Image: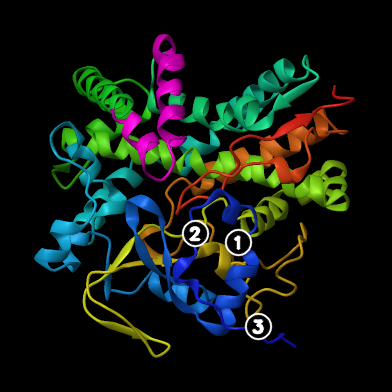
Amino acid sequence: MTQDLPRIDPSGVDITASTFKADPFPFYAQLRQTAPVAQVNAGKRMGSAWILTRYDDVTALLRDDRFAKNPADAMTRAQYRRAPKIPGGPFKPLQTGLLSVDPPDHTRLRRLVSSAFTPRMIEELREDVQVLADQLLDAALRKDTIDLIADYATPLPLIVIGRMLGVPESDATRFHRWWQTFVTAGDGGSSALRVVPTLLRMLRFMRRLVKERTRSPKDDLVSALAVAHQDGDRLSEDEVVAMIFLLLSAGHETTVNLLGSGTLALLQHPEQLALLRDDPSVGTTAVEELLRFVAPVETATERYALGDVTLHDVTIPRGELVLGVIASANRDPAHFTDPDTLDLRRSPNPHLAFGKGIHYCVGAPLARMEGAIGLQTLLRRAPEIRLAVPPEQLRWRSSFLVRGLESLPVTLAGGR
């Protein structure tokens, strides 16, 4: 029987704060029961946002044509003038990405990227991912203590997606440094402003790479995107650059947080860690459960109300930002037995970690494969892994979309 929880005022809660990210689940449990449609603080850049916390509501939102991805389609002129925007000029490609547009533009872009980002291409990477995981751990095991985020969870998917895209080896170190600067910039304020020069360098680099691959295609993802066409349609240069940027996020962000936060969850549940370490057959369900439990992507990407929308007797005004909280939906007791329990054998597991509907994450198969190989290789090579600092000293990244650790100091005692 569900315990009655007191009503709270969520409007002052900053869902991007590092302290909130450490354990947002009790707050979401309260909202599911007492205020399933609530207005919260979504950080300096986004301001206030409406959040949906029940599984059924989040699932419906991801398919609901009363909400748009493009704010220009939903907002009044006055709202749009006040809204935070990506500037034009060299930043224009970021306005045309797959996550920022609605059908029919989305349908066209999704069809073209799917013709390049194929399951066969991902499966062919399996051996490379395993070799890379072992190489990173070879280096890590020479040290007493490592930062699992910086030394393993980040370079593994970032190197893989860089190779898939066709980033030249001579540029790989610089490219990876740029991307790390970008993703650690936070949710707003001075840190976000400092990332602008890095973002400009990344976009110029991507544009040069697209031009080179258009002139002389190779066996890589940028070439596949540059030459992809269906029924005479193909991606423009801006659209290819935007797609590279999206694939970097889709092929990197979820895996970093899955490996980092997933390892922390296992260390805090030693019986589950032992299960995954000692029984390779549990790998597939373990990854699905960790995706559900640790919420590497905390909320779905932005939606905007096309008109006034009433849910649970609460009216969301036209043009306002709405976020489906995946982290809450995946702990909804209406759909998961003992949702706050980590159970690596959980099945079925209808979590929403990769979204639903037409915006379902294109990088999901890659993240699943990297997560399974990355976690099982870590536990096999370092069976006595343990936290090197008290859990309360860990800091979480500030963001309204993702939930991930800034660092995870661990000791790989007894590693092989």
Q: Quadrant of the N terminus?
A: bottom right
Dot 1: element: loop
- 322 on left or right of 226: right
Residue 274, given in percent of the width and then of the height, sits at: 87, 46
* Residue in the picture at 46% in, 67% down: 12
Dot 3: element: loop
Quarter of the image holding residue 135? top right
- First in sequence: mark 1 or mark 2? 2
Mark drawn on residue 41: none
* Residue in the picture at 86% in, 33% down: 383
- First in sequence: mark 3 or mark 2? 3
Q: Tell me where the magenta segment starts and ends, as one range.
A: 169-196
- 81 on left or right of 8: left
- 238 on left or right of 316: left
> Which colour assignment does the render follow?
rainbow
Between 297 and 286, the one nearer to me in the picture: 297
Q: In the rendered structure, which amino acid carries the disc numbered 2?
A: Ile
- First in sequence: mark 1 or mark 3? 3
Q: Is residue 190 magenta?
A: yes
Mark drawn on residue 5: 3
* Residue in the picture at 22% in, 52% down: 108
From mark 1 to mark 3, how far is it between C-alphas? 15 Å
Residue 307 makes an appearance in the image:
yes
Give above or below for 132 relative to 32: above
Residue 167, given in percent of the width and then of the height, sits at: 38, 20
Residue 197, given in percent of the width and then of the height, sits at: 29, 25
* Secondary structure character of the magenta stretch overall: helix
Q: Which residue is mark 2?
A: 15
Mark drawn on residue 24: 1
Circle 3 Cα neighbour tier, 10 Å, few/some/many (<14 / 14–19 / ≥20) = few
> How many numbered marks have been drawn onto this rendered protein structure?
3
From mark 3 to mark 2, how far is it between C-alphas? 20 Å
